[in-house]
Image: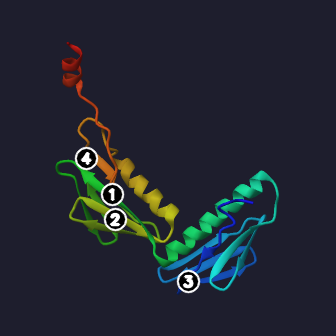
Amino acid sequence: MSRIGRLPIALPQGVEVKIEGTTLTIKGPKGTMQKEIPYNIEVIKEEKSLVVKNKGTSRRDKCFHGLFRSLAANMVTGVSKGFERVLELSGVGYRAAKAGSKLSIQIGFSHPVEIEPPKGVNFDVEGQVRIKVSGVDKELVGLIASQIKEIRPVEPYKGKGILYQGEKVRRKAGKAAAKAGGAG
């Protein structure tokens, strides 16, 4: 039995769970999420928790057991608290603004880059250099944040670009510093 899979998922107040056939629906104050239950997994709703059980005995079935339990736990957290990723712009003249629901980023190109959020994702801009990506689906929030980061990845010489909040950039010495250090 999977160590992760056997842990029950606590249901906070205000979260409703509905199991219809092979569909798990979780509804909370932040929104609603649905996921198909794999053939080898059984989901049981108890009073204040959700239990994920494994029907199979193979190694692959055990892997799916832990995976689906983690996905269900993320669904519960998403509809009750939500998820967010914070990105920071580092560079002279780099700034972000919100135009309606779209995100407009000026990041050193000849034109601003505009990003339309998919359904279930919101953008917030704090102080022109901090972008907050939030939503109920952890996977989608992380995907959108990584796509924004790919627009201008951080370069190692000056540290300019888009990075996650708290991310450390490993800086490299330039050509002049490398020559001066090796000429001794």
* Residue 133 x %, y %: 38, 64
Residue at position x 66%, y 86% in the image:
47
Rounded to the nearest whole Å, what is the CA distance between mark 1 and mark 4?
Answer: 18 Å
User: Which is nearer the eye, 123 or 38?
Assistant: 38
Which mark is nearer the camera, 1 or 3?
3
Examine the rendering and report whether any part of residue 113 can be seen. no
Tell me, yes or no, if residue 55 can be seen here.
Answer: yes
Give me the C-alpha separation between circle 4 and circle 3: 45 Å
Mark 1 or 3, nearer chain start: 3
Q: Amino acid at mark 1?
A: Leu
Q: Which mark is residue 87?
A: 1
Q: Disc 1 vs disc 4: Cβ atoms closer than 8 Å?
A: no
Q: Secondary structure at mark 1?
A: strand
In the rendered structure, find residue 109 and report the number of the disc placed on it. 4
Q: Secondary structure at mark 3?
A: loop
Q: Is residue 65 left or right of residue 144?
A: right
Q: Position of residue 70 (x, y in %)?
A: 61, 64
Relative to residue 179, is residue 22 depicted above or below?
Answer: below
Residue 132's tag is 2
Q: Residue at x 78, y 64 (%)?
A: 40
